[in-house]
Image: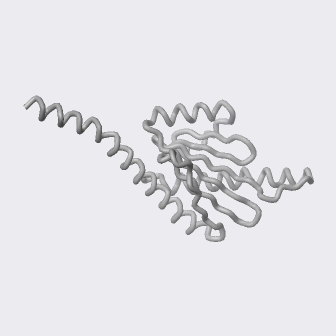
């Protein structure tokens, strides 16, 4: 009887992490599909492109959206716990400005020219925008910078809206 209980305990101990990872992975894939559907419906002129994360990054979804000379990169990271996600946001907050945009998630940060990051439960979402054809004209570069911030915030809101009920 002890052998059966010990074997069962060992089996549960060994198999439990795999179950959690597969649930997290399928949940993350569901988030990714929801984001794609939502953005394609609301931003039909933008072209979606899947980006494969590094092979050891099972807890990350990367998406790239392009339109004319602008490119938006969305990274959704599933953390093991809400506390881990909070810690990740605190690291980001050191280099950025707290956004205070309660519509995005529990907390958000803007940093750089066109990056918005926010946390929803155990997920952190990073939306970054780059201009693929930069200019040397300072006035034009300033317009690009303002536009990058606007697009990053807009996409962050669309992503937050897409995953709010998930």
In the displayed structure, 145 sits above or below 47; it is: above
Q: Tell me: 66 left or right of 75.
A: right
Q: Tell me: 62 left or right of 148.
A: left
Q: Residue at (53%, 42%) from the top-left corner?
A: 119
Q: Please, which colouring scheme is shown?
A: one colour
Q: Tell me: 96 left or right of 12.
A: right
In the displayed structure, 10 sits above or below 54; it is: above
Q: Residue at (55%, 34%) from the top-left corner?
A: 88
Residue farthest to the right? 137
Residue farthest to the front? 3
Report the quarter where the N terminus lies.
Answer: top left
Q: Residue at (64%, 61%) from the top-left corner?
A: 65
Q: Tell me: 89 left or right of 94.
A: left
Q: How many marks?
A: 0
Front position in the image: 43 or 102: 43
Front position in the image: 160 or 19: 19
Question: Residue 97: where, in percent of width, then height?
Answer: 68, 36
Question: Residue 78: where, in percent of width, then height?
Answer: 48, 44
Q: Residue at (77%, 62%) from the top-left corner?
A: 69
Residue farthest to the left? 1
In the displayed structure, 34 sits above or below 138; it is: below
Q: Specify the quadrant of the image occupied by residue 144.
A: bottom right
Question: Residue 121: where, in percent of width, then height?
Answer: 46, 41
């Amino acid at each position: 009887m002890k052998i059966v209980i010990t074997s069962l305990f060992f089996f549960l101990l060994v198999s439990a992490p795999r179950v959690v990872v597969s649930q997290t992975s399928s949940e993350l894939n569901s988030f990714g599909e929801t984001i794609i559907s939502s953005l394609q419906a609301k931003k039909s002129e933008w072209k979606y492109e899947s980006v494969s994360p590094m092979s050891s990054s099972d807890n990350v979804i990367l998406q790239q959206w392009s339109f004319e000379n602008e490119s938006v990169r969305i990274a959704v990271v599933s953390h093991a716990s809400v506390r881990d996600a909070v810690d990740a946001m605190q690291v980001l907050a050191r280099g950025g400005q707290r956004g205070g945009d309660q519509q995005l998630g529990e907390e958000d940060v803007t940093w750089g020219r066109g990056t918005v990051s926010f946390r929803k439960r155990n997920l952190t979402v990073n939306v970054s925008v780059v201009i693929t054809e930069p200019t040397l004209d300072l006035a034009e570069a300033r317009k690009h910078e303002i536009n990058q911030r606007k697009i990053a915030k807009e996409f962050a809101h669309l992503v937050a809206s897409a995953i709010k009920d998930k």
